[in-house]
Image (cartoon, rainbow, N blue to C red):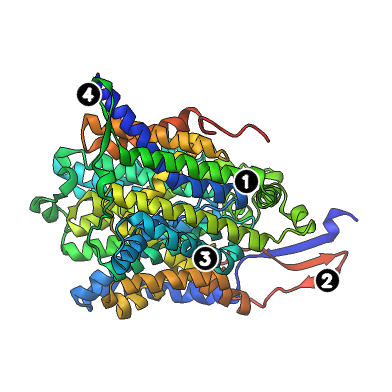
Amino acid sequence: MTGLLDTIIQGILLGGLYGLFAAGLSLAFGVMRLVNVAHGDFIVLGAFLALYVQRVLNLGSPFTTLVILIPVMFVIGYVIQRLILNPTLGDDILRPVLVTFGLSVIVENVLLQAFSADSQKLQGGSLEITSIALPKGLAVGWFPLTMMAVCVAVIAILQFIMYRTKLGRAFRATSDDGMTAGLMGVNSQHLFAIATGITLATVMVAGVFTGIRASFDPNSGPDRLIFAFESVIIGGLGSLWGTLLGGVLLGVAQGIGARLSPDWQILAGHLAFLVVLMVKPSGLFPKRGD
Amino acid sequence: MSAEKIKVLVQRSTRTSRVATILFVPLVIILVLAPRWLDRGTISMLVEFFFYLALAQLWNLLAGYAGVVSLGQHAFIGLGGYVLFGLCVIAEWHPLLALCVAGVVCAVVAIPVAALVFRLQGAYLAIGTWVIAEVFRLAFSQVTSLGAGSGISLPVSVAQDIPISSLERDTVLYLLSLVLSLFVTFGAYWLLCSRSGLALTAIRDNEGAARSTGVDNLRVKLLIFVATAFGTGLVGALIYLTKFRISPPAAFDINWTSYVIFIVVIGGIGTLEGPIIGTLVFFLLRQYLADLGSWYLIILGAVAVAVMLKMPLGLWGAFSKRFDVHIFPTRRRLAKAEVEGIVVNDKAEAV
C-alpha cells in the first residue's frame, strides 16, 4: 500500500515535468493554432545548451545557465517564428506541420553533429539526492518538488501574461479574430513571434529539468513532444491548468505502468492517453468559454 | 435556352499524357526484363526505389488529397512486416500468401485506429498517429515469440519458398516491388479519376466547399486511411521480406515517414507525378550525400523546409503550372463548348 502511495506521489510530481513540456505547446496552440512538431527537439536543444554553457563557463549548477539561456531561447523563438513559421500560418494545416517536422529533423541532426549520439546528463548537485521524510516511511525528493513548484510558477506566469497584461489581451484578441485585432493595430507577425519566444523560454526551463532528471541524447526529442502532446490532449485544449493536470495524470499512469513492469512505463502512459481520447475526446478539463 | 442547344466536350487527357501512355508500355517491358542485364547492386537499389515510390504515393494520397496529415504511417510498415514474420515463422505460411494477409490485417487495424485519431483535429491528428506508431513499437517489443525488443530473423526455409519456377529469389522480389509500385501509382490514378477521386480533389482544394456540395468528408477520409494502410502494410511486409530480419526500433522507425514526407514535399504534394520526381531526387541526393551522415538529413530537411516555404507545389507542381504539362491527367477540362451553334470555348486539341 505504501508502495502504491509512493508511486502515485512520484507520478504526480513527474506531472510537473510534463506540465513544463506541455505549457509552451498549449500556449502556441492557444495563441496562433500552431502545433510545433519540433517542440520536443527544442526541449532537448535546451538541455544540450545548458550542458554546453555550464561546461564552458564552469558553472556550479545548470540552473544558473538559465539566466543566459532563457533570453537566448526567446530570441531563437522570435527569429524562427518571424522567418520560417509566420509564412506557413493560414487555413492549411499541412504547411506548418510539415515545416516544423522538417525543423525537428534538422535540430535533431545538428545536435547529433555537434554533440554525437552519446547520452548526456546534467548534474543537479545536492538537490538531486536530498529528500523530505514523510510519515509511513515515505520520502519526497527535493528535485521533483522543485520541478512541480517551478511548473506551477511557470503556468501562473503564463496565465498572468494571458489574462492580466496588455500583451495577453492582444494574444487573446488575435486568437479570437485575427483580422479585427489587426484593424485595432495589433501586429500579428510580431505578436506570434513573441508567443514563440515565450514558448521557447518555457522549453528552456523544461530542458534543464529533463536533463537533470534523466539522461538525454539528440534522438530523445520525439518522446518529449509526445508526452507534451498527451498532457495537452488529456487536460483539454486551451486550458493551461488543465494541461498541468493532464501531465499529472500521464505521470501517474506511467508510474503505475512502471510498477507492473519497467517495460510498461511509457506504454501505460500512451494507453491512458488513448483511453481519454476514446472516452472524452475534448479532454478531462476543457476550457469553459471565457 | 434549351439544354440540347448547349454542347460541351470535357477532356481529361492532354498531349503529354497521350505521349506518356505510348512511352509507358516499352518502359514497363524494359523494367520487367531489367534483372537479365543489371547487376545485383543496381537491382537492389531499384527495389528500394520502388518501395519509396509506393510509400510516397500512398502518403501523398492520404495527406495531399484527403488532408489527413499522418506522421505515423510507419506504424503500418512495421505492422505489415511483423504480420508477415509472425505468419511465416510461427504459423509457417508461404511468404507470398502471408504478404497479402499482412496488407489485409493492416487495413482492418486501420479502422479502430482511425476511430481514435480522427477525434483529433488537424495538426494534433498528426501527432496522434505518431503515438499510435509508438504504441505498436512498444507492444511488439513485448511479444517474446517474435523476439521481443531484439527482433527476429526469417528461417532459411522461408527464403527457399520465394522462387517461382525458374525465377530466382531476387528476381521475384524485384518484380513484386515493381508490380506493387505500379499498382499503387495506377490505383491512385484510377481512384482520382473515379467519383471518390472527384470528392478527394475537392477536399484537397477546399474542405469547407467540398462539404457544402455534399461530399461526406469523414467517409472519404476513412476510406483513404484504410486503403493507404492496406498499401503501406503490403509494402512494409515486402520490405521486411527482402531484409530477412525485423526488430521493433527499425520497423517502427520515424525515419520511414520522414523520408517519405521529404520525397512528397520536394516532388510536389497533391500531384501523382510529384512522388515520382521526389523519389528520383531523393535517390540522387542520397547517391552523393549519404556519406555525409547527419549532414545528409540536415540538407534534406532544409531543402524540404525551403520548398514548403518558397515552392509549396514542389518541383513538379511548379513545373507543371509553368508549362501546363500533366502526365497523369486527373483534371477535367472544358475542351469545347457550343451554345446555340456558337462556339464559346474551343481548346479541343486535334487528336
Q: Is residue B113 above or below residue A199?
A: above
The mark nearer the N terminus, 3 or 4, is 3
- Toward the viewer: A8 or B162? A8
**Residue A75: mark in rendering:** 3
Q: Position of residue A144 (x, y in %)?
A: 33, 39
Cβ atoms at labels 2 and 1 below 8 Å apart: no
Which amino acid, by three-letter code, is at mark 4? Gly
**Mark 2 highlights which residue?**
B343
Q: Is residue B226 visible?
A: no
Query: Which numbered mark, 3 or 4, is in the foreground of this view?
Result: 4
**Mark 4 highlights which residue?**
A137
Residue A93 in which image quadrant: bottom right
Q: Position of residue B59 (x, y in %)?
A: 44, 56
Which amino acid, by three-letter code, is at mark 1? Met
Number of residues whose C-alpha sits closer than 10 Å to that of mark 1, classed few (under 14), some (14–19) or many (20 or more): some
Query: Which secondary structure, mark 4?
Result: helix
**Label 4 vs label 2: CA separation?**
93 Å
